[in-house]
Image (cartoon, rainbow, N blue to C red):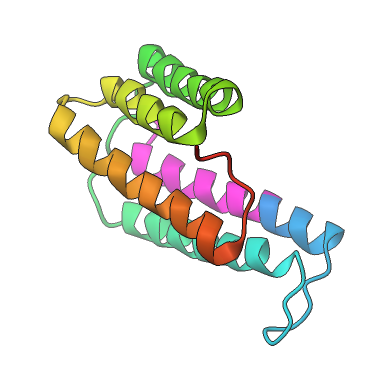
Amino acid sequence: MIDQNLTRGIFLVLFALIFGVTAALNYPIGAFAHGGPGLFPVLISILLGLVGLALVIRSRFEQKVPMNFKLKNIGVIIGSLCCFAFVSEHVNMIVGIVLMVFIAAIAGTNYSWMRNVKVSIALVLIAFAFQRLLGLNLPLY
């Protein structure tokens, strides 16, 4: 039996290693005072790796949970990301974010339109913060 908690932890550690090493090798990291383009991805990869390591350690002390794949849910999540990309390109990113949240929620166990509205508002506010505070060129409207 494949342990779901252990698999999650190993996947996160591998994901963090792949992106962290790629960022460190391809982009200058710089220093904290003047960070280079590789600093942020490396720091996020380190944090993600620590979370993955914590999950691996925690899985040793918890009861094993069997791994099961729900291909429908995987397809729904991939479809929601594709819809986000398509709508963001052809309409605007706000509509893309809302559409992505409402489609991705279909993969969950209980659908709540009110929760989807709250998550959509939070993500749109984060996108506005990225646009205004970080100066990112996001096609929000």
Query: Residue furthest toward the bottom?
Result: 33
Query: Residue furthest toward the top?
Result: 72
Q: Can residue 10 be found in the magenta stretch?
A: yes
Q: Residue at x 69, y 49 (%)?
A: 18
Overall secondary structure of the magenta section? helix
- Specify the quadrant of the image occupied by residue 77: top left
Where residue 98 sits in the image (x, y, percent)?
36, 31
Where residue 60 sits in the image (x, y, percent)?
34, 55
Instruction: Describe residue 32's horizontal placement relative to residue 113 as left or right.
Output: right
Extent of the magenta region: 1-18
Instruction: Describe residue 22's horizontal placement relative to residue 110 as left or right.
Output: right
- Res. 2 visible in picture: yes
Q: Residue at x 31, y 39 (%)?
A: 120
Q: Nearer the viewer, residue 30 or 128?
A: 128
Q: Nearer the viewer, residue 53 or 23?
A: 23
Q: Is residue 82 above or below residue 14?
A: above
- Specify the quadrant of the image occupied by residue 112: top left
Instruction: Describe residue 94's horizontal placement relative to residue 45 as left or right.
Output: left
Q: Is residue 31 above or below residue 100?
A: below
- Res. 1 visible in picture: no
Q: Residue at x 49, y 20 (%)?
A: 83
Q: Residue at x 22, y 45 (%)?
A: 63
Instruction: Describe residue 121's horizontal placement relative to residue 48 as left or right.
Output: left
State the quadrant of the N terminus: top left
Where residue 37 sits in the image (x, y, percent)?
75, 65
Q: Is residue 108 above or below residue 3?
A: above
Q: Can residue 113 be found in the magenta stretch?
A: no
Where residue 127 sits in the image (x, y, percent)?
46, 49
